[in-house]
Image (cartoon, grey):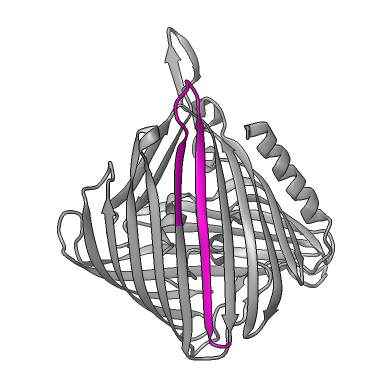
């Protein structure tokens, strides 16, 4: 399957999304008003962690890895969101986008934001029930923001999105310094025959295609794009220390295709979600394609609180109500090593147990234990680590 055919498939998926009638996502105002409304937004997350064995990249400590401030505004059928974040001593741009609601069935968003690919991006970085993003989710770059446009369509039994984007490097690097701009498209299609509180079932499929990254280089006085490449990485699942775990640099790349089926089920105060990831990088000069895969699964239970609810606009479980106590058991596996392509990204397993206490509407406390191992990685020796970490966050 070549790059042109994949683009055609994504375009067809976009047309399919547009053909279904619906109500709007939760992120779009469900009312029409000619009054300008501006609401400030802010958050901060404080993490503390200890490690065994420690040393060699792991040291107990604490950090405020994410502090944000911004605003959201709405006027008539338009909405706007802008946020700037601060973490590890640096400022960074977070969400900057405008959204227009055509009618009660369709909306379009444009700017710099997380495009929907699977379950996790819609939840945001602070609302992952398992504390940290699944390792496979991070390695595949699902949580990376990109400049682009996303069409959203939401109906009682179906949600679909279709996006066109340029790589997030375009936010920080001029196009001429990139040599050639990386661009792509993605879609998420979800069927949900049951989505009432305490009775939820959905299946979905996400697909993405993106051209290779490049750098500008000068050869014999002529400046042009370098050979294409991708660099897929993931640290150990902790923010207090930033320790590399997986790393796959793929040279002579032409494009990458990613596919990911997903599943969510909930009955009463028990819920489960899972997602499988598959990726293939086509390469030039008769180089063997690089392939990677992985999976994550979560089993969630309410110790104190109501039945699990549903967030219609992002096709995911809703946040538990204030006062809830939740326990989450998680597992993530990533196989980033492809001997045929001579790329040794590594293999990792991550098993975790998380307690979430939803203090009130704005405050949340988490406690997580995880066992993580890695082997066959070009950026890390074979090893394991036990991590105990806690988080207190304020979000409004």
The number of discs equals: 0
Q: Is residue 260 visible?
A: yes
Residue at image position (52%, 87%) is: 322
Our reading of the magenta stretch's main secondary structure is strand
Query: Where is 160 relative to 25, above or below?
Result: above
Query: Where is 160 relative to 303, above or below?
Result: above
State which region is magenta.
Answer: 268-294
Q: Position of residue 94 (x, y in %)?
A: 52, 55
Q: Position of residue 285 (x, y in %)?
A: 47, 20
Q: Position of residue 27 (x, y in %)?
A: 67, 67
The quadrant of the image that shows the C terminus is: bottom right
Q: Quadrant of residue 318?
A: bottom right
Q: Residue furthest top?
A: 220
Q: Quadrant of residue 378?
A: top left
Image side of residue 111 versus residue 280, left or right: right
Q: Is residue 118 visible?
A: no
Q: Is residue 285 magenta?
A: yes
The quadrant of the image that shows the N terminus is: top right
């Amino acid at each position: 399957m070549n790059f042109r055919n994949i683009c055609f498939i994504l375009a067809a998926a976009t047309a399919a999304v547009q053909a279904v009638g619906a109500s709007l996502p939760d992120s779009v105002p469900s009312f029409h008003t000619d009054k300008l409304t501006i609401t400030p937004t802010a958050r901060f997350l404080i993490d503390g962690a200890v490690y065994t064995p420690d040393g060699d990249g792991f040291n107990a400590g604490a950090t405020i890895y994410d502090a944000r401030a911004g605003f959201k505004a709405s006027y008539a059928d338009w909405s706007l969101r802008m946020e700037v974040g601060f973490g590890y001593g640096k400022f960074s741009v977070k969400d900057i986008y405008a959204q227009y609601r055509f009618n009660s069935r369709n909306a379009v968003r444009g700017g710099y934001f997380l495009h929907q690919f699977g379950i996790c991006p819609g939840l945001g970085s602070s609302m992952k029930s398992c504390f940290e993003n699944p390792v496979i989710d991070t390695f595949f770059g699902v949580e990376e923001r990109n400049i682009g446009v996303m069409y959203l369509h939401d109906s009682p039994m179906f949600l679909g999105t279709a996006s066109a984007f340029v790589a997030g490097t375009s936010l920080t690097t001029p196009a001429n310094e990139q040599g050639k701009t990386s661009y792509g498209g993605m879609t998420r299609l979800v069927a949900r025959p049951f989505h009432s509180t305490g009775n939820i079932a959905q299946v979905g499929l996400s697909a993405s295609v993106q051209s290779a990254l490049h750098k500008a280089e000068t050869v014999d006085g002529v400046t042009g794009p370098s050979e294409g490449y991708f660099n897929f990485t993931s640290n150990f699942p902790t923010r207090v220390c930033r320790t590399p775990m997986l790393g796959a640099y793929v040279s002579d790349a032409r494009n990458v295709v990613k596919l990911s089926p997903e599943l969510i089920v909930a009955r009463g105060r028990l819920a489960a979600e899972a997602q499988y990831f598959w990726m293939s990088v086509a390469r030039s000069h008769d180089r063997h394609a690089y392939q990677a895969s992985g999976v994550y699964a979560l089993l969630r239970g309410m110790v104190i609180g109501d039945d699990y609810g549903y967030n219609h606009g992002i096709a995911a479980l809703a946040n538990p109500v204030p006062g809830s106590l939740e326990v989450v058991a998680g597992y993530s596996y990533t196989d980033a090593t492809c001997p045929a392509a001579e790329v040794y990204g590594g293999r990792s397993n991550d098993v975790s147990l998380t307690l979430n206490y939803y203090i009130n509407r704005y405050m949340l406390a988490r406690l997580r234990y995880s066992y993580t191992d890695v082997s066959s990685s070009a950026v890390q020796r074979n090893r394991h680590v036990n991590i105990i970490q806690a988080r207190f966050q304020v979000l409004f």
